[in-house]
Structure formats: structure tokens, C-alpha cells
Image (cartoon, helix red, strand yellow):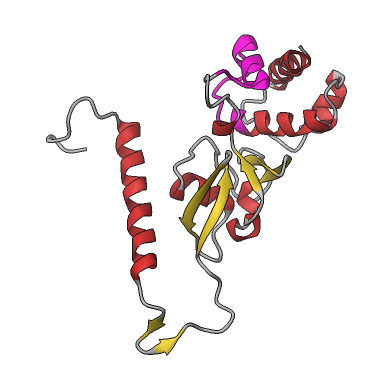
Amino acid sequence: MTEETPAHVSRRNFIKGVVAAGAVASTSAYLFRTTTLHGQPSAAGAVERLMTLNVNGQDRRVDVLPQQTLAMTLRYSLGLTGTKIGCDRAECGACTVLIDDVPHYSCSVLAQRVRGKKVVTIEGLADAATGKLHAVQQGVVESQGFQCAFCMPGFVMATVGYLKTNPNPTRQELAHGISGNLCRCQDYDKILTALARGAELMRG
């Protein structure tokens, strides 16, 4: 940020603005380019880059490279930075999102593969109209179940997905259900307590 940047502009909002500007520029370049390059038609079998993704209940038009992961698309094309990239090789679970209500590591899913599916990230859990947190999020707030909380979005998304299949799990069942997620602070006891509280709130 330069000296001319207004004082009220936070670092987070500044970065979001840069990301959004880059996405707009990239998409605009794609939209207004011609269908041929130096008079040559597009290569046979080329993947259509401009696509629509349904994310958190909204259809989002986005320019996606053929090799681009869903995690990269969510964070850097759509600005949904709640999805964290930890190991970037499907081992830690920090990037977990729901695809058609099933938890997936978004770092190992190509964005092109979720066309026509419903993607939900941590930003899409709270009630859009009232801002009320999802029960699992509320359980985390009440129990203060994380230390650095880098892994928290992935744990929450994994738990929400698991509770759709088993809404009343024992502590051991819940631990097994989210065992694909790792915490580098290793405070699993507090995490389980918080997520179990979330399951309790979901049951009312």
C-alpha cells in the first residue's frame, strides 16, 4: 500500500481488491478475444475456460484454466479465502468444501469437474438473510475449540458433511468421521468438544 492509499482501506480489503481486479481483467480478456489465433481455429478438444460454477447458492461466472484446482478458483478467482490451502496435496483437509453435500479436498478437485454441481464453502454456511451462524460454527464459537484456527474451516465443513449422514454421533464416531482432517496445533480434544457441541445444537 502506498502513502496515497486512504487510511480507512484495510490490508485485507486492499488485497481483495487486487484479486478482484485481476479476475475481472482475466475474464474480460477471455470474453473479448477472438475465436481464432493468427487466423487459426481453436485446437480440437480444447477445454472451454469460461464457465459457471454454483457456489454458496449463487451462479458465478469465472475464467478457469484446464489444470486449475477448485481451491485455487475459490480463493483467487472468487475471493472466498475461507477455504485454506495447507498441504496442497490432499493430506491435511484444510481446504475441505462440500460438493453436492459431500466433503471433498478442494485442492485435489479440478474446478472444471464441478460444473453443474453445488459447492458450499465456509462462507456459505451462515444464513445469508440474517447472518446467523450455522450450528457447527456456533459450537466452535461457544467452545473456543481451536488455537490458530487455520484448519478450522476444513474441520467445520467436514463435520457439516458428516452430520448429514450421522446427525447423532458418539464422540468416537465423530472423531472417525472427520479423521481426514489434521490440526497442526494438535488440540484434537478441544476440537472434538466444539464440533460435538455443534452437532448438539443442530439436533436442537
- Residue 24, by quadrant, is bottom left
Q: Which x, y percent locates residue 90? A: 67, 48
Q: What residue appears at the point 65 percent right and 46 percent down from the top-left corner?
A: 118
**Picture mark count:** 0
Q: In what quadrant of the picture does the C terminus appear?
A: top right
Farthest residue in the front direction?
129
45 or 93, which lies in front?
45
Look at the image and give the residue range highlighted in magenta: 132-153
- Residue at (56, 72) in percent of width and height: 47
Q: Is residue 7 above or below residue 190?
A: below
Can you give x and y, in whole percent of width and height, for residue 40 in the image?
A: 41, 89
Q: Report the residue that reaches farthest toward the bottom.
A: 39
Residue 189 in percent (x, y) is at: 73, 17
Image position of 82 (left or right of 12): right
Measuring 80% from the left and 26% from the top, which residue is drawn there? 175
Quadrant (top left, top right, bottom left, bottom right) of the N terminus? top left
**Where does residue 153 sit, x and y in percent of width and height?**
60, 31
What residue do we see at 62% from left, 16% from top? 138
Residue 147 forms part of the magenta stretch: yes
Would you say residue 191 sits in the magenta stretch? Answer: no
- Which residue is at the front of the view, 148 or 140? 140
**Is 152 positioned to the left or the right of 192 in the image?**
left
Compare residues 93 and 75 and report the one nearer the observer.
Answer: 75
Q: In which quarter of the image is residue 2?
A: top left
Quadrant for residue 195, please give it.
top right
- Seen in the picture, residue 95 relative to 61 is either above or below; the reply is above
In this rendering, the answer to whether 15 lies above or below 52 is above
